Image (cartoon, grey):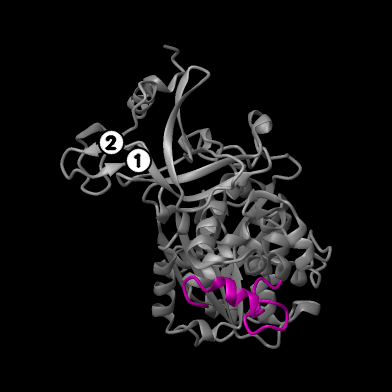
Amino acid sequence: MSSLSPLGDPLAGPYFQAAGQGRLVVQRCNACGALRWPPLAGCPDCRNRDTTWVDVAPTGTIWSFVVYHRAFQPELVGQVPYTVAMIELDDGPYMIGRLIHGEKPPTVGDRTVAEFVDADGVPCVQWRIP
Amino acid sequence: MDAGLSALADAGVATSDLDGLIACKSVQGQGNDVAVGALLGLNLPYVQSLDYGTCNFSLHLAVMAILSGMANTVLLTYGADARSRKFDFGKPMYGADMASAAGLVHIAGRAGLALQRHKAVYGTTDEQFGMLAVGQRLWAQKNPNAIFQKPLSMADYLSEPYMVDPLRRSDVTMISDGGVAIVVTTAERAQDLPNTPVYVSGIAEHAGVRGDHNPENLMRPWLIDAAAAIWDSTGLTPADIDALYIQDPTAVWSLQMLEYYGFCALGEGGPFLAEGHTLPGGDLPLNTHGGQLSESYTWGWMHVVEAVRQLRGQAGQRQLDSPQISMYCSSHGFVKAAASILSTNPGVGR
């Protein structure tokens, strides 16, 4: 594994490793049980540092979304227009990710399902309106 | 430095009268206290630098330094050459993260998420929200200093393509160069200076530093706490404000703060804007210089300069009819809120 790969990141590595296996995981506080995303070194609800990565359902609803018509970075030039959404997971936490949709524009409240894709060797999660 | 010297000349304060300097590091990392202090050539008792100024935070620190007795007369400075240097605002400010990896880059992304949600929950329309961009341009046409003065009708606005749907180009500030400076001193000393003093009648802040990827981060409901603090501590209400200033790197900030500071009910920002209150001639003049959408980016510092000019009656063809009390509401990205109330009446807010 390359030293630059997020798979080995001390904080977020388990998320990428799970995505490579087709699973969606977040952190759970061992003390109070709160689920958290994005990864943090401790629980902001009870300040305990004991943490376990747990599977969550790869489903949720669109809390909001934006459609980029301008590429603000060179690597995004070939991708516009593209859509980014904040997904409210059925299990609670919110995740920001790329949203794949057909001709019909997405709307807030639409159901989405996680897809696990490989982006140049890095396992990634994107969301699709089924 | 030019802005600093202009502000000192305007205030009738000599550099030898200064005992404080508060600089702020621009987004590009320039302009901290050591850099500004070196140019001014002064070793002062109180010198400080903020990572994020947006003027309110610098102003509040100056007030605290003066009230604590650490300084009496403080120069506040901001300066940036983001346009000449072609600073990349699309680059993640705090380094790459999960959201930027998904392509959520530039402030328009997160601001757009907040607006899209506002539209879905409250039914806010493009025409209502567009009143901010259109209104700021109307004000800017009365301001020779404004960068964008070309007329912008609602039809022009609506015909603009989306940049980051639901935001159009005119909903987001431009990148500009500029320097701004303000002199703050004690009320007692201000009596002996040539200008009509403008008093800091109230200040309040509230942070929302708890985490990313959540509705609180985007909708910023903690702005209500800054609002409650400033209304409670001054005994004023929104009805007392003659001129309102809202830091507006995107028009979404104005929509949120009009609601959270109580100028209209939560969710009612759209219809409130459509009624024209904030336009020239309206009963709640907003960003009478054109704001960041039309005048200049300058991190929201010009809002305070304009508030002072209006209170002193120095605002030229956009001068309001004898405003007595002004308010400036600003934020630090998605994590901090600050508000100040300024007045020519030393009894306000006591």
Residue in view at x 67 percent, y 37 percent: A71
Mark 1 vs mark 2, CA separation in Å: 7 Å
Query: If the image is split into quadrants, where does the C terminus of chain B sit?
Result: bottom left
Residue B217: image location, x then y, percent:
43, 53
Query: Is A72 situated left or right of B188 in this image?
Result: right
Q: Main secondary structure of the magenta part?
A: loop
Residue A36 sits above or below residue B312 on the image: above
Residue B211: image location, x then y, percent:
38, 47
**Residue type of the residue flagged with mark 1:** Trp
Residue B313: image location, x then y, percent:
72, 82
Q: Can residue B215 be found in the magenta stretch?
A: no
**Residue type of the residue flagged with mark 2:** Gln
Q: Nearer the viewer, residue B332 or B151?
A: B151
Residue A52 sits above or below residue B185 on the image: above
Secondary-structure class at tag 2:
strand
The outermost residue toward the left is A31
Would you call the spot at circle 1 few (<14 residues within 10 Å), some (14-19), or many (20 or more)?
Answer: some
Would you call the spot at circle 2 few (<14 residues within 10 Å), some (14-19), or many (20 or more)?
Answer: many
Q: Chain of mark 2?
A: A
Q: Chain of mark 1?
A: A
- Residue denoted by label 1: A37
Residue in view at x 40 percent, y 74 percent: B228
Residue A106: image location, x then y, percent:
54, 48
Residue in view at x 58 percent, y 71 percent: B270
Residue B295 in view, yes or no: no
Query: Is A16 situated left or right of A49 in this image?
Result: right
Write down the region rendered in magenta: B264-288
- Residue denoted by label 2: A27
